[in-house]
Amino acid sequence: MKYVNYAGTVRVMTGDAIAAAVIRYAAALHQSRLSDVAAIPSTDVFGCCARVEVLLAPAIAVTGEPAPDDELEPEDTAFLRELDRRTTAALAFDARATDATFGR
């Protein structure tokens, strides 16, 4: 298990593979100067499946740290595939080729 630390204020406990994928995606977004929302699979205080939505953007710090092992470790393969697809797309984006007034 890992904690995904978001913006220094929120800790999301999730599986190791999911935490690593979120960190890779955040790095790809930072490199491409993009942002996106990701709904990180987790468990609530009662052990039920939950998702925590976070904004991943270049100016927001995201880190991972070890968490206590838990038998309820989320293993969401669909989420991992989707985040891998998004990471690939973000890395393929060329921010320099975009009009500087885009989004203004």
Image: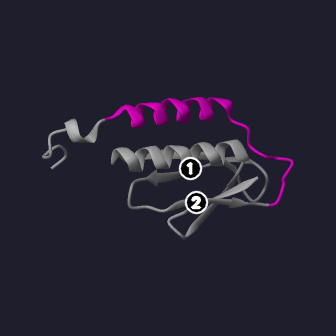
Picture coordinates of residue 102, whole percent (x, y): 17, 43
Mark 1 falls on what kind of element? helix
In the rendered structure, are the residues bearing label 1 and label 2 in contact, judged by CB atoms less than 8 Å apart?
Answer: yes
- As for residue 72 lying within the magenta part, the answer is yes
Q: CA distance from mark 1 to mark 2?
A: 7 Å
| Residue 79: image location, x then y, percent | 60, 34
Residue placed under numbered mark 2 in the picture: 63
Could you tell me residue 76's position as x and y percent?
68, 35
Vertical position of residue 36 compared to residue 59: above or below: above
Q: Nearer the viewer, residue 8 or 95?
A: 95
The image quadrant of residue 64 is bottom right
What residue range appears in magenta? Answer: 68-93
Crowd tier of the residue under label 1, counting other residues whose Cα lies within 10 Å: few below 14, some 14–19, many 20 or above: some
Q: Which mark is residue 55?
A: none
* Residue that appears at 87% across and 48% down: 71
Q: Amino acid at mark 1?
A: Ile
Question: Crowding near pointer 2: few (<14 within 10 Å), some, many (20+)?
Answer: some
Q: Taking 23 as reference, is 84 above or below it?
A: above
Q: Is residue 56 left or right of residue 84?
A: left
Q: Earlier in the sequence, mark 1 or mark 2?
A: 1
The foreground one among 82 and 64 is 64
Above or below residue 92? Residue 68 is below
The residue under the point 56% across, 49% down is 23
Residue 16 relative to residue 34: left or right: right
Residue 15 located within the stretch drawn in magenta: no
**Pointer 1: what residue?**
23
